[in-house]
Structure formats: C-alpha cells, structure tokens
Image (tube, rainbow, N blue to C red):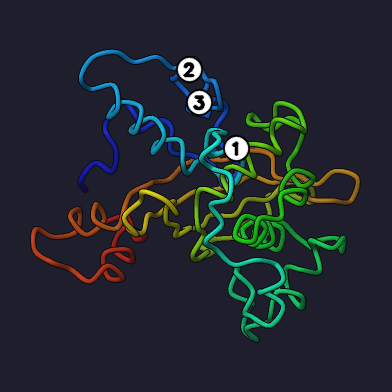
Amino acid sequence: MATMLSPTLSHVTSGIGSSRSNFLGVRGFPAARGNSGCTFSGSNSQERLRIVRVAAEVKGFGKVVPKTKKSAGQTDKPSRDAAKTSQCPCGGGEDKKVYYECCGRYHGGVIEPDAQRLMKARFSAYALGVVPYVVRTTHPENPDFEGVDDFAADVKATCERLRFVKLEILEFKEESETEASVSFIVTYTILKGGRGERKFLKEKSIFVKENERWLYRDREALSQASEAAWMASTSSIFVDSEIARKALNKGK
C-alpha cells in the first residue's frame, strides 16, 4: 500500500484526542501551538510549516491545530442551534436521531453508558464546537492534556479550523469493566485553504472508567490520508473514493 505520509511525519498520525506537541501538537517537532517558536529559513520555509500543520491537524479529538489569530471566526460548520432539528453529527444511530435526542443529552450532563457512546458524543462535540464537553471527558493523564485552559484553547482552534463530516465505528471492545477501546474512521475537511478535499483518520482510542464515568485516555494511530492518497493507493487509474476507503479499511 502506498505510503500515506512521508516517513518523517508518519509517527504523528494518532488520536481523536490530539498529539502532545501539536490536532491534536506534533511529536518530533517543536510545539505547534501559537507562538510555537518554530522558525524555518530558506525558500522552503512556507512549505515546511504547511507540512507540520497538516500533520498536526488530525491526531485524535484533542488539541489538533495551533492557536492562531486567523483561526477565529472560521465557523463554516453546523452550530448547536442549527442541530436541534438536524440529524446528529454522529449519525444518530439506527433511528437517525436529531442532536438533542442523541449526543446533545450527553453534552448536557447525562452520563454516557459506555465508551462507544462517549466516542460518538466527542465526535459530535468537535463537529459542533462544544469545547467544554471535550475537555471534561479527556483524562487528565492524556498525553495531550497540559492544563484545562491551554487544552480548551487548542480544542477550540481545532473546531474552528476543521469540519468533521462523518464518523464510522469499526470496532468497540470492552477490555474490562474499566477499560475499553474504539476503532474508527473520521472523515473531515479543512475549512480554509483546504481546497475542499476530504481527509481521513483511522484510529483506535483508549478509554478508562473512573468514578463511574468513561474518559478518553490515549490513542493508537492506524492510518491517516487524504481522499486522493487513498485512491492512489488502491489503483493507478480512477477508483471511486468510497471503494478506495473500504479497501483501506480492510488493510489492502
């Protein structure tokens, strides 16, 4: 299968949480949040910075995108008010429930029955910009959690920078009464400067139960790529993107 990212960046493709120094900081790079101190010189400086930011975009549902002044106001995405009568971002289950009958209940304080439900609610929180929910359902020992204020600012920047399109649950496994994992694929686009291209994140998130509540603890990246990369990895000629996605899902 074709390489999804360059070898230099392949190690930064994990989490709907976020990576420590970036979607989430970028492991292996200087801190990617605002005033990161990343300084590049020479004719390739703009491109190198762009690569770092793209690599940082989708590591888990956590601090994904650097905090910048430009991120403010980029909200070309669904709002909580608009979601009242719309299908929940997570899909709404078999009944195609609207937001306030689905994930909105958990955003409002109802306790999630299991890690899979928490996974879906966190996705919807990112899709609708419900930052407090993402923060309070992230374990304080998560590698990306560096204090409530900084983490909340990073999550907000992520919500403003990306549009979360679709969540697919691949596997839900309860390892024990207090630990579970959810493997999934997230489809997303970059709101500004992303040319509308759909990107995909395939990941395994780890959850733990403490004080009767499930929390997002860690993640394991499975793959990350753009729609074009998936298609190219499947065939040298044009292949329907949905077929290509399913092929990647099967590990081809």
Taking the spot 75% from the left edge, 43% from the top edge, the residue there is 135
At mark 3, the secondary structure is: loop
| 141 versus 217 height, above or below | above
Q: Are marks 3 and 2 in contact (CB under 8 Å)?
A: yes
Name the residue beneath numbered marker 2: 30
| Residue 169 point in image, percent of width and height | 54, 64
Disc 1 marks which amino acid? Lys
The residue at the far left in this view is 237
Taking the spot 89% from the left edge, 51% from the top edge, the residue there is 212
Q: CA distance from mark 3 to mark 1?
A: 10 Å
Q: Are marks 1 and 2 in contact (CB under 8 Å)?
A: no
Image quadrant where one finds the C terminus: bottom left
Q: CA distance from mark 1 to mark 2?
A: 15 Å
Label 3 Cα neighbours within 10 Å, binned few <14 / some 14-19 / many ≥20: many
| Residue 121 point in image, percent of width and height | 69, 61
Name the residue beneath numbered marker 3: 32
Label 2 Cα neighbours within 10 Å, binned few <14 / some 14-19 / many ≥20: some
| 158 versus 237 height, above or below | above
User: Does residue 36 appear to the left or right of 218 in the view shown?
Assistant: left
Disc 3 marks which amino acid? Ala
| 38 versus 122 height, above or below | above
| Residue 181 point in image, percent of width and height | 62, 50
At mark 1, the secondary structure is: loop
Choose between 15 and 136: the one closer to the eye.
136
Taking the spot 56% from the left edge, 45% from the top edge, the residue there is 158
Q: CA distance from mark 3 to mark 2?
A: 6 Å
User: Does residue 126 appear to the left or right of 11 in the view shown?
Assistant: right
| Residue 101 point in image, percent of width and height | 76, 78
Q: Which mark is residue 63?
A: 1
Choose between 175 and 22: the one closer to the eye.
22
At mark 2, the secondary structure is: loop
